[in-house]
Amino acid sequence: MDARDSRLIDALHGGFPVCTRPYAAVAESLGMSEGEVIDRLARLLDDGTLTRFGPLYDAARLGGAFTLAAMSVPEERFDAVAEIVNGFPEVAHNYRRDHRFNMWFVVATERPEGIAGTLDRIRERTGLAVLDLPKEQEYFLELRLPT
Amino acid sequence: MSAPLTASVDPALDPIDRRIVAATQAGLPLTAQPYHAVAAQLGLPPEEVMRRMNRMVEAGAIRRIGAVPNHYALGWTANGMSVWDVTDDQVDEAGHMVGGLEFVSHCYRRPRRPPDWPYNLFAMVHGRSRSEVEDKVMRIAAVLGSWSRDHDVLYSTKILKKTGLRIGG
């Protein structure tokens, strides 16, 4: 990643235009060509510097229900439990964290009543308790990392 | 007669919006005319795709259109979920203060689950190292002062699954 990549990533944090030639519009503001912007973006996505590029949808606004769930998994069962939990298509992200509650995952279902059912099935399949910690309020400011 | 003063943009998405979401949630095409490419894929006029996407931005269904950096690739390898037990009367004010800190990426109020889980305010903090995260957590603690009765930081040590949220279509 070079200085021009950094400038591009910084410029593309948000506000990508909705118009016929949006890459050309961004390119002009950066003193690059349209082709350079597209090529650099393709490479940054390909090498994993960027995880995606495009519209970020507010998942809750698209309908559907979400919760953050946490489990305290005995170390000797951790991998097996992770496999069970990850096998649920409703589980979108799952992180290991260094805490007594060592497994944290997001559950997403199309309908609100699907959350409780999914958590119940995870409890049944694992024999473990699951904390249900739905978002009650969000205090939002977009992350902006210096690059 | 009297139109509501708020909610000038209808937040509801119709089936055509949802087709656009399904076609773009993995990313925009890297071609000179990306919205035209989406329109062609969906059999819609490009102007309609652009109009609907602008509307979704205004309505908040699209938070932003841009690049999502991989924190790890950029060297931001420490990811701490700081959790705080804040007095109920102060938690919303505390949330606005903490959520407004430039280094907090997400800040949420969630229910306590006593006795296992006493924390009601979650603030995600990223850094290049754990000590950098610890410094930021100290700054949150300073902001909250006596409103916070207790806190903890849970570092992620492994991504076990990351598929993103997807709608059908």
Image (cartoon, coloured by chain):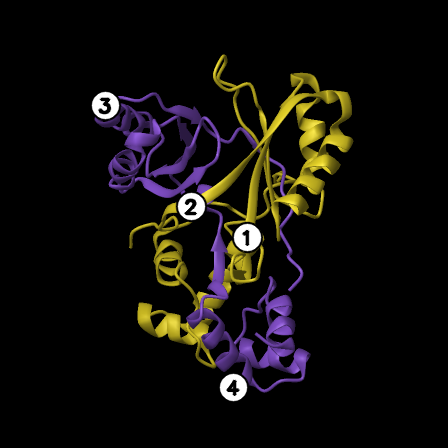
Chain colours: A purple, B yellow
**Badge nearest the viewer, 4 or 1:** 1
Specify the amino acid type for callout 2. Answer: Lys
Q: Marks 3/1: CA distance?
A: 34 Å
| Residue that carries the numbered disc 2 in the rendered image | B158
Placement of the N terminus of chain A among the 4 image quadrants: bottom right
In the rendering, at what x and y percent does residue A32 appear? 62, 85
Q: Marks 2/1: CA distance?
A: 11 Å
Specify the amino acid type for callout 4. Answer: Gly
| Residue that carries the numbered disc 4 in the rendered image | A35
> Which mark identifies residue B77?
1
Q: Marks 4/1: CA distance?
A: 31 Å
- Tag 1's secondary structure? loop
- Tag 3's secondary structure? helix
Specify the amino acid type for callout 1. Answer: Thr
CB atoms at circles 2 and 1 under 8 Å apart? no
Q: Earlier in the sequence, mark 3 or mark 4?
A: 4
Q: Earlier in the sequence, mark 2 or mark 1?
A: 1
Circle 1 marks a residue in which chain? B
> Which mark identifies residue A39?
none
Nearer the observer, A115 or B155: B155
For residue A3, which quarter of the picture? bottom right
CB atoms at circles 3 and 1 under 8 Å apart? no
| Residue that carries the numbered disc 3 in the rendered image | A124
CB atoms at circles 3 and 4 under 8 Å apart? no
In the rendering, at what x and y percent does residue A26 appear? 61, 76
